[in-house]
Image (cartoon, rainbow, N blue to C red):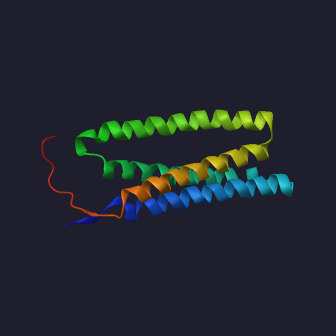
Amino acid sequence: MPRPAGNAVFTPTLLTCVAISAVIHVAVYTLNVVLPLHVAAMGGSETQVGLLFSVYPTLVALVVDRTPERERGLATGTLSGSFDAGIVVGSALIGAVVEHASFGAGFLAAAAAAVAGLTFFAVTERRRGPAALVSPGPVSGV
């Protein structure tokens, strides 16, 4: 039985999560800097962690859906390593921004990174074209 390809599910999920992430970063910046309400401990960071754990499984499903069966282990491992490296490098970079500027600047930098990632994903998805129907078919040659 055919199943819908990833564009119908993955793209809206990732775009929504990243857009919410950018909005939360801007909201926390606004509440902390413009209105001096210190809300970072009131749910902004926890919401980010929740979104992070909803984006990762979606990315894994996207990689598995778009990778030939023989290369799925390598592709999933590459995604996992890149995701972890992004957390390490991103944390250090945002920490440097906070140290040299302010927490507000750190939140704005994180929002800018989210918007840049969202834009890159949207542009590359648009180039892929409309979703096609994919039949899983039998597993062979493994």
Give the percent coordinates (x, y) of residue 124. 44, 53
100 w.r.t. 132: above or below: above
Q: Is residue 84 visible?
A: yes
**In the rendered image, which quarter contains the N terminus?**
bottom left
Task: Check the picture and name the quadrant holding the C terminus.
Answer: top left
Q: Residue at x 49, y 57 (%)?
A: 122
Residue 125 rendering spot, x and y as whole percentages? 43, 56
Question: Which image quadrant for residue 135?
Answer: bottom left
Q: Residue furthest front?
A: 127
Q: Residue at x 54, y 62 (%)?
A: 16
Residue 120 coordinates in the image, percent (x, y): 51, 50
Q: Is residue 129 left or right of residue 3?
A: right
For residue 117, above or below residue 89: below
- Image coordinates for residue 37, horizontal then vertical, percent: 84, 56
* 70 relative position to 125: left or right: left
> What residue appears at the point 58 percent right and 33 percent down from the top-left corner?
88
Q: Is residue 88 left or right of residue 69?
A: right
The quadrant where residue 141 appears: top left
Horizontal side, residue 104 vs residue 82: left or right: right
The residue closer to the viewer here, 63 or 129, is: 129
Query: Can the viewer see residue 37?
Result: no
Residue drawn at point x = 38 percent, y = 65 percent: 8
